[in-house]
Image (cartoon, rainbow, N blue to C red):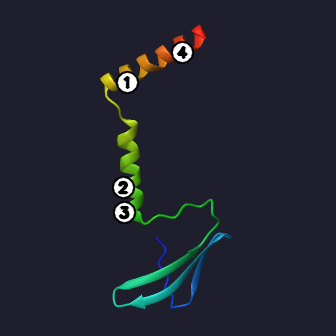
Amino acid sequence: MLILTRKVGESILIGENIEITITAIDQNKVRIGIKSPSHVPIYREELYRKIQKENRAAALIGKEEFENLLDACTAEGKAAEDR
């Protein structure tokens, strides 16, 4: 891990496209501003971990759910062939 010291108004550059600026320091909190291209997602760590957990849970389906989904897809395919 790289540890840097910055004062209010000073920045850190990551590559050519990302700039992190210290906007305020108050007791044990630091406020930062982040400039980056719109295609680069930026998340707070706790939110990112929650999204990952929910995505993993959504990807896991039970055997019965899978069979129901497979039956529905098969029925749709047969209906399309009949048209």
Q: Judge by depth and name the residue closer to the eye, 50 or 20.
A: 50
Q: Residue at x 39, y 61 (%)?
A: 47
Q: Amino acid at mark 2?
A: Lys
Within-10-Å neighbours for mark 3: few <14, some 14–19, many 20+: few
Q: Quadrant of residue 37?
A: bottom right
- The residue under label 3 is 46
Q: Secondary structure at mark 3?
A: helix
Residue 77 left/right relative to 37: left
- The residue under label 4 is 77
Q: Amino acid at mark 1?
A: Phe
Q: Give the number of the mark in front: 3 or 1.
A: 1
Q: Secondary structure at mark 1?
A: helix
Instruction: Point out which mark residue 66 bears.
Output: 1
Label 1 – label 2 distance at C-alpha: 24 Å
Q: Are marks 3 and 2 in contact (CB under 8 Å)?
A: yes
- The residue under label 2 is 50
